Amino acid sequence: MVALPVQFSRGDGPNAWVHKMALYFFRISHGQYSGASDLPYDFDTREAAWSEMRAVCANLVGGIARSLKPDGEWQMELLDEAKAPVFRIRMLGEALE
């Protein structure tokens, strides 16, 4: 497990320091549709961001499974501030014949 570096920025006053939380974005891809949120979410740690992503996917999985076609794919990615993927959860329907 890799820990994110803690980021601090100068707050008000000569001796004030404020912890800066990491910003993340969610991107969902389903078939030809792919879209990332414009609204950032802030989390203290990567682990907290991963936990939230799992919880969101758990709430969506029933509807996703009902609409998934053979050879279809659905995925959610957690993107960092630069919109680079950090985590991905995928659901894949495969026709094996």
Image (tube, grey):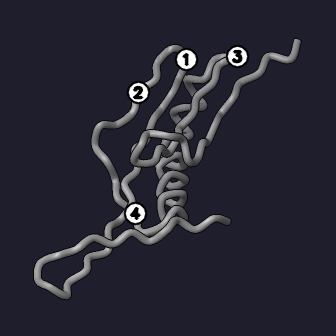
Q: Secondary structure at mark 2?
A: strand
The mark that comes first in sequence, 1 or 4, is 1
Question: Seen from this angle, which residue lies furthest left?
Answer: 13
Which label lies toward us, 1 or 3?
Answer: 1
Q: Position of residue 97 (x, y in %)?
A: 88, 11
Mark 2 and mark 4 in contact? Answer it, CB < 8 Å: no
Is 48 in front, or is 62? 48
Task: Kindly identify which residue carries mark 2.
Answer: 35
**Where is 67 relative to 60, above or below?**
above
Residue holding disc 3: 70
Q: Which residue is mark 4?
A: 43
Task: Say which amino acid is labelled 4.
Answer: Phe
Horizontal and vertical percent position of residue 47: 54, 65
- Dot 1: within a 10 Å radius of its alpha carbon, few (fewer than 14), some, or many (20 or more) residues? few
Q: CA distance from mark 2 to mark 1?
A: 11 Å
Instruction: Indicate the secondary structure of the residue bearing disc 3.
Output: loop
Mark 1 lies on residue: 31
